[in-house]
Amino acid sequence: MVQRETVISIVPAIVVLLPLLGGLGAMLADRYRPELRNISVLAGTVLPLVLIASMYPLVLSKGDHYLFLNVLPPNGMEFRVDMLSIFMAMLFSFFSVVITVYTIGYFKDKEEGKKFFYFLMFAVGGSFGVVLSGNMFTLFLFFEFMSLMFFPLASYRATPEARAAGLKFFFMTIIAGVAMFWAMVSTYSVTGTLSFGAGGLVQTATPLLLVAFICYLIGFGIKSAMIPLHFWMPDAYGAAVAPAAVLSSAIMLKTGVFGLIRVIHDIYGLSFIQDTGWNNILLVLAVISVFYGSVCAFAQDDLNRRLAYSGIAQVGYMLMGVALLTNMAFIGAVYHIMGHAFMKGCMFLCAGVIFVNTGKQKISEMRGIGMQMPITMMAFTIASVSAVGTPPFNVFVAKWHLGLGAYQAEMPILIVLLLLSSMMNAAYYFPISINAFLGCRELKNIERKRLIFEPLRMMPVIILALGAAAFTLAPSNWPLNIVRMIAQAYF
């Protein structure tokens, strides 16, 4: 691992604190000055984006930003912003702004939507804490906080289905927390530290460390909806309001993948994992996730549930790239974190717009809907083409590098898996758009006012649709260059 200079900075802690203050500000605003609520939540996401953007050139030129807070001994809270952290933080901060703007439009003039913003801000702050953590203990604290804040978001509709889905997620979060706590204690007892940045803390394989590795897989695998720990996600997405589904898909799922990257490269170390072959456990589960998620997506008539099962397959690509332990596969996995966020985030936003405008969530009821909602369905179509891996979209770049990584690992059979899953993506996504534009145009009467272009809902949709290809069409693919620098630091 490339050694970098360390710069002491309080900025990472401020970035984590701002969304939390934004949520508290929203509470006070709703009680005393309701007109200031939206300003508070926007400030809680825009200001972190500005601070993270200001840190990027400094991290690039001067090295990692570091802060240690001597609280909660013996390990303490630690923040470290390296290239991986700054990439994830920029991604999360951008999408937090997009999701906040969309949520304001989604709950426009709805009194029942105000409490949603409190937990949204707290969950965003937790996600920032995860990716800016400097040790596994700090990551664990924010990981659990973020997950608990998503519980009321998942059950926010207060229907029986939403409550059941929220409770299922809650109990899975408890299981993840117990598994990760056991893994941390085991790691600390062997190494005496949980800090990142050393390129691996473990020297000798023991049964205790293998159990800890499996516990890390359980904890982060639950959050990333890895098979067989996925069953909370289809129910949660199917019953949740659209902003909650977008938050989980674009941001929270990625914290699970991020955590496994830290486990493999910063806790155990690349050489240790290569020697033990423990990565093959993750590789097998990732391959199963790709196939299982794609197959189950076919059977779903509920749009959100189809997107959820597709998400299981898409996260399987990321986990596969991490498990292959080659630099090209790693580039494909990390780049796919961004590509999936744009593609699947756009789809969930579109699903939310369709539901708000028409009340429809069943795919079988959406024939001809593209005639009344052309912009929404065009954006959905762009995201669908990206999901398949068609050039020049982001997902193609990710799958290309995953394929090269499979060759590096001498597993060309995985390229066949990528091709088959892409064809399956096309088979369950393209018919939605075809029926929307070419299906029956005789829809039930819909109030005309519901079809008015709502900027706060539609601008995020358009931005994410454009983002699915914007970087690959630019003269220089800036995110890909960052990802290559991250890979260079690890390989």
Image: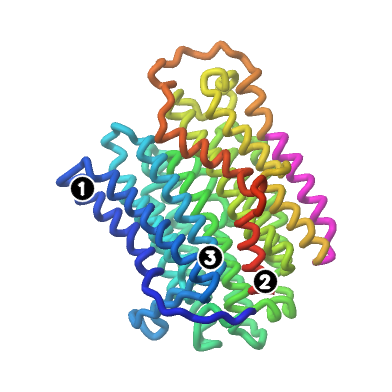
Q: Amino acid at mark 1?
A: Ala
Point out residue 380 in the picture as x, y percentages from the top left corner.
58, 33
Query: Closer to the N terminus: mark 3 or mark 1?
Result: 1
User: CA gap, disc 3 to disc 1?
Assistant: 36 Å
Residue appearing at x 60%, y 55% in the figure: 337
- For mark 3, what is the residue? 219
Q: How is the image coloured?
A: rainbow
Please report the residue visible at 68 percent of the width from the left and 54 percent of the height from the top.
317
The residue at which mark 1 appears reads as: 29
Does residue 11 sit above or below 248 in this rendering? below
Magenta stretch: residue 262 in it?
Answer: no
* Between 228 and 315, the one nearer to me in the picture: 315
| Magenta stretch: dominant secondary structure | helix
Residue furthest to the front: 475
Q: How many marks?
A: 3
Stretch of the chain drawn in magenta = 409-428
Q: Quadrant of residue 49?
A: bottom left
Spatial CA distance of label 2 from label 3 is 27 Å
Quadrant housing the C terminus: bottom right
- Residue 469 image point, x, y percent: 63, 43
- The residue at which mark 2 appears reads as 488
In the image, taking residue 273 as reference, residue 208 lies left or right, namely left
Write the residue at 63% across / 28% down.
432
Pick the front one: 315 or 343: 343
